[in-house]
Image: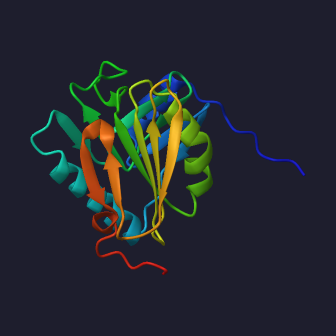
Amino acid sequence: MATQPVHYVTPEEYLKFDSHSEIRNEYFFGEIIPMVAASYAHGQISANTIRALGNHLSGRPCTVLANSARVLLHQDTAYAYPDATVVSGKPEFADRDNDTLSNPKLVVEVLSPTTRNYDLGDKTRLYWQIPSLTELLLIEQDKVWIEYWTREVGGKWDRQLLLGLHESIRIAALECEIPVAEIYAGVELNL
């Protein structure tokens, strides 16, 4: 069975296309990936997470950004729009337009049925390669399930799985603790 060839797009072509697009688009090894509309639960969890991070980091030299912040995952091969991004200190940009962050401290991805495999696989591995990144949160939208990755001294990544509303995420690098219940506040879950 023949398949349609995928047209290779350079990073420069992608950035030009994305800057004029009405929707957000990610870039993965020469392919432009349109970001489809999120579910209501996805939106709730994203907003809750951004609010919780903002509240817990208030007064600190950190900036919490929504999913409109493009992040460079790997030079010339991948760009993404995490559901939330935290920059510690001064933001650094990969471009002259100052619209592609290169120094995220923490990123958050809320998993969707259509992006789950990509988010948990290739995208996570690319996130791990960002030198400034020390924290990664992968959050399921249909049930209480948070995979929290933290970079240990020496560069090794360690995983913690949170499965209960009574638990808290202790983000050592940002010196804050966020209750899982805050992330899932108001979300109808399949318990």
Toward the viewer: 79 or 127? 127
List x then y, in percent, for residue 55: 16, 53
Question: Is residue 67 visible to the viewer in this orientation of the structure?
Answer: no
Quarter of the image for residue 184 reads bottom left
Q: Residue at x 35, y 33 (%)?
A: 104
Q: Is residue 171 above or below residue 187?
A: above
Q: Is residue 112 above or below residue 186?
A: above
Question: Is residue 128 visible to the viewer in this orientation of the structure?
Answer: yes
Relative placement, left or right, of 138 versus 88 is: right
List x then y, in percent, for residue 133: 40, 32
Quarter of the image for residue 181 reads bottom left
Toward the viewer: 36 or 144? 144
Q: Residue at x 37, y 37 (%)?
A: 70
Toward the viewer: 161 or 19? 161
Toward the viewer: 4 or 51? 51
Q: Residue at x 42, y 37 (%)?
A: 18
For the rendered model, the colour scheme is rainbow
List x then y, in percent, for residue 139: 45, 58
Relative placement, left or right, of 108 versus 49 is: right
List x then y, in percent, for residue 165: 37, 71
Question: Across the whole image, how many numbered discs are drawn on residues?
Answer: 0
